[in-house]
Amino acid sequence: MKLPGALTLSELLPVAQAGGFAVAAFSVRYLACIRPVVEAAVEADSPLIVEISQRELGWFAVTPRAFRDALERALQGAGADLPFALHLDHTWELPVIEAAVEAGFSSVMIDASALPFEENVALTRRVVEYAHRHGVSVEAELGRLTTTDKLEPEGDEAMYTVPEEAREFVRRTGCDALAVSVGTAHGVYPVKNPRIDFERLAAIRALLPGTPIVLHGGSGLPEETVHRAIRLPGGGISKMNVATDLENALLGAMGGLKRMTSAELDALPGELRALGLEAVRREARDKIERFVLSAGRASAYRPGVEG
Ligand code: 13P
């Protein structure tokens, strides 16, 4: 059963697209990091997306059910009426999607972008049919995202999303939001100013006026780049994924510890862990306030209140 109060991307993102802001989707990785991102959103009166990917479920040894339960406890602890989604990030296998939907996720991503176009369409369509039967939204991906250690300045554009293909893809799959490849990558950029293909982003928006666009690889982007991506004519990106900056804040504040499992983090001394979690809260708040500009926008989702 869907986690009570959890919204779909179709409920969260069009409001952001029309309102000139985006919703930060925090890939928290560790269960303990859910609470500080919830606190940051409550303090900033902001909508929030909390997410974890198939790969992260494995790396950090977390189950979808444990993730849902940790979010439920954090929301109860915060005692606030927060517009939020519980989202499954990059996933390529149906059983993982089914497990998340059964655990109460309100949204899932099927990432079949490594497959040829027709196969991406077919698999995404199948996930949309399944998820919509459960009232769950679907983010899909067209074009390839890479990691920052694999950026190839000469060859990158071959992986970028083609606007006409994006239109056909959304029409045929019925996906609720589209992750695009326009120059960002997962991880922290070796260069300070990654080149975003804004013309391509604007062309995708023009062909898909009603489809929320998702920007992956939100870590390390300059704030003006994010603002420009949000403020395109007709509304730019309305969901921005952030993973690396949060984990770096966590591990950095604990003296540069190496990545560990979620349970190993829980087993660290409380005082040390508190330093890390406080850094996560500050980092999330900064992304909300300075980057995606969603502070004060929670009211846009409350009935009878103009946002
Ligand atoms: P970063 O690690 O660059 O923030 O990317 C996160 C992401 O896009 C998760 O899907």
Image (cartoon, rainbow, N blue to C red):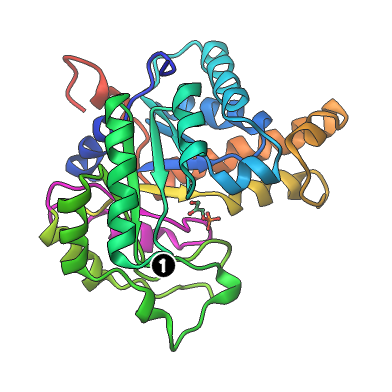
Q: Is residue 71 above or below residue 217?
A: above
Q: Is residue 223 magenta?
A: yes
Pick out the residue farthest to the bottom. 154
In the picture of the structure, the residue carrying the numbered disc 1 is 144
Magenta stretch in the rendered image: 209-235
Mark 1 is on which residue type? Arg
Whether 267 is drawn above or below 220: the answer is above
Quadrant where the N terminus lies? top left
Instruction: Judge whether residue 224 is colored magenta.
Output: yes
Residue, x 53% and y 17% (percent of image)? Answer: 72
Q: Nearer the viewer, residue 272 or 11?
A: 11
| Nearer the observer, 1 or 266 | 1
**Left-right relation of 259 to 26:** right
> Residue 286 at what x, y percent from top left?
50, 44
Is ligand 1 less than 8 Å from the beta carbon at label 1?
A: no
Q: Position of residue 238 (x, y in %)?
A: 29, 46
Q: Which of the two residues, 159 or 293, is positioned nearer the viewer here?
A: 159
SS under mark 1: loop
Is residue 134 among what the camera can see? Answer: yes
Q: Position of residue 148 (x, y in %)?
A: 56, 70
Left or right for 252, reference 73:
right
Position of residue 39 measured from the top left corner of the image (x, y, whole percent): 54, 25
Compared to residue 1, the image places residue 26 above or below, namely below
